[in-house]
Image: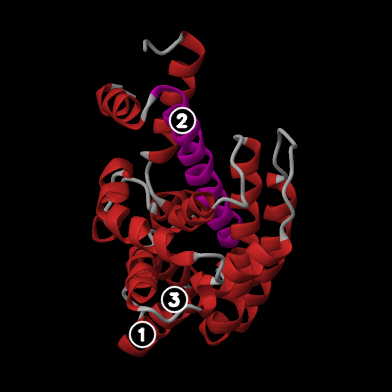
Amino acid sequence: MQMDSVDLQSLRIAKELLERPGITARIAAKIGTPVEKGLALLPDRLQKTVHRAAEKSIHIAYDIAMRTVEPSTKKDSNNLGHKLAVAGTGGAGGFLGPASLLIELPISTTLMMRSIIDIAQSEGEDIADVDTKLACLEVFAFGGLSTADDAAGSGYIMTRAALSKAFTDAAKSVLGKSLAEETAPLFVRLFSSIASRFQVVVAEKVAAQLIPLVGALGGATINVIFMDHFQDMARGHFVVRRLERKYGINEVQTLYRELII
């Protein structure tokens, strides 16, 4: 089936969102300082905290979001409302410093998950479906293209391919259970895979907040950038999935690779 011009333009926009420079470049553009300066300030102990916070956040965010979000037939998403909410948590985190990460990040990530679900529904996804729930979780693995994101397995199609077996195995094993309560090896592997990619972006966020003079105001700004990044990843991801439902996975992904942006 040949893709019509409207859908082709949607796919092009999705690719522009998914393959744009990552969060490091966005933060540097806003605060006027390379994030690498902050990364150099990250001690080993704090890096371990980042990993724990990332994994904890993925578990909590998924579970809370799935328990509190109701199915919807609306055609738009409240991106601004979620950005304003996450700005508040970022301001508090920036004021209190890295010590607050284990408290602030799960809250911010939960707000991001709520926004991701909102976007998924606006693209016609059924959040009662296990595949959609896992697709929402998958968004946290998308870093966007940049040198700093290489460790996160950059490249949208490549990341989906790398995670496909873990997601397929998990989907077969859910059977209505809460993923946050699941301790089976399939889920341990799934959450570890997501967290290992998510923590790269989290480390960049924390590093930016360590830069002198960033403070609470900068923390709020950085969290808005953080939210904006994953909203873009979600929008692109669910546009691609909508087109895959219409035209077929292989057809859409082949065309995605061929598109020049």
Q: CA distance from mark 2 to mark 1?
A: 40 Å
Q: Quadrant of the N terminus?
A: top left
| Residue carrying label 3 | 55
Q: CA distance from mark 3 to mark 1?
A: 11 Å
Q: Which mark is residue 76?
A: none
| Residue carrying label 2 | 245
Instruction: Using the rendered view, name the quadrant where residue 222 is placed.
Output: bottom right
Q: Residue at x 44, y 68 (%)?
A: 202
CB-based contact (under 8 Å), mark 2 and mark 1: no
Q: CA distance from mark 2 to mark 3?
A: 30 Å
In terms of sequence position, does the residue under pointer 2 or pointer 3 come before the other? 3
Residue 115's place in the image compared with 256, above or below, is below
Which amino acid type is shown beneath numbered disc 1?
Lys
Q: Which residues are magenta?
A: 222-247
In terms of sequence position, does the residue under pointer 2 or pointer 1 come before the other? 1
In terms of sequence position, does the residue under pointer 3 or pointer 1 come before the other? 1
Which amino acid type is shown beneath numbered disc 2?
Arg
Residues packed near mark 1 inside 10 Å, few (<14), some (14 to 19) or many (20 plus): few
Horizontal arrangement in the rendering, residue 94 relative to residue 190 (left or right): right
Horizontal arrangement in the rendering, residue 115 relative to residue 34 (left or right): right
Q: Residue at x 30, y 56 (%)?
A: 163
How far across and down, in percent of the image, does residue 144 sit?
37, 47
| Residue carrying label 1 | 48
